[in-house]
Image: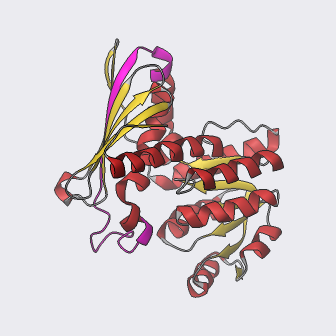
Amino acid sequence: MLRFGLFGTGHWATETHGAALDAHPRVELAGVWGRDPVKAAVLADRYGVPAYDDADALIDAVDAVSVALPPDVQADIALRAAIAGRHLLLDKPLALTVADADLVVSAAGRSGVASVVFFTARFQPAVDAFLTATAAAGGWYAAHVLRSASAFRPESPYRDSLWRRQHGGLWDLGPHALSVLLPVLGRVTRVAAVDGPHGLVNLVLTHEDGGSSTVSLTLDAPPEVVRHETVFYGENGIRSVPLGEGGPLPAFAVAIDQLVTQIDSGTRDHRCDVRFGREVVAVLAAAETARATARTVDV
């Protein structure tokens, strides 16, 4: 059994990370740490495991960490865990700065630990099969992504998420968009960005092979216009990415499976490892600069 420490106490930690870890046949959930000790104790009691008041003590007690914390906090925990030789199951975005992402990548490389960054769609079988087939077909020169959410309404479990309110759709939804664009159109080399109403951020991305994509993101849309869609355009026509089925919980179970497989096999080349997570952060950081300076920014 692979012993996991869970870092985080919010809705995502409780209903996705914790639930999937607790149910997985190859995993033992060994403890919980959170910034709020009271919430950590409640979550730990739910799963019948100890609550830790010291993050490093939990890192020392496990083989791997599962982190569901704001990106800046996650980067610090991931760095400490990688230095300690613990495998990494992280959330998107990996960090809020390229410098912090680089530290995690470097530490993971030095320690030789396995890593997976959880981009939900990449672990949903229908989406993964679509991206593999679409990338293999080739000839794609454009794409459009719309991710419109209503995260701050009273009924939303993320209504009190301070980091989402501060960093908006670019950093919360942008990683999801990039996770499906990059496998098909390749790396992003240049970014332009402008803001719109309702927290909207519009991106124009230039990809390494000359293709381009547009991305529209907001967490503060009216409920009537909540929508997720990704469409590729190319020599073979138009293809829309299917919606993933089953929600995040079975997808996270797949992510656990794939991390365990890496650990068992000794491979360290997962398509959504911390190096890919760093690539996504670099695009988001360039987009942030583009927004602030009203110019196109190289990645």
Tell me if I can see residue 19 in this picture: no
Which of the 4 quarters of the picture holds residue 197? bottom left
Which of the 4 quarters of the picture holds residue 41? bottom right
Between residues 211 and 273, which one lies in front from this camera angle? 211
Q: Residue at x 81, y 47 (%)?
A: 110
The residues colored magenta run: 134-163
Which residue of the protein is positioned furthest toward the top in this rendering? 235
- Does residue 153 sit above or below 135 in this rendering? below
* Side of 216 where 12 appears, left or right: right
Q: Residue at x 71, y 80 (%)?
A: 52
- Does residue 248 sit above or below 230 in this rendering? below
- Does residue 58 sit above or below 107 in this rendering? below
* Side of 266 where 20 appears, left or right: left
> In which quadrant is the N terminus drawn?
bottom right
Q: Position of residue 86 (x, y in %)?
A: 78, 58
Q: Residue at x 30, y 56 (%)?
A: 149
Per the image, is 137 magenta? yes
Between residues 233 and 127, which one lies in front from this camera angle? 233
Q: Residue at x 42, y 55 (%)?
A: 172
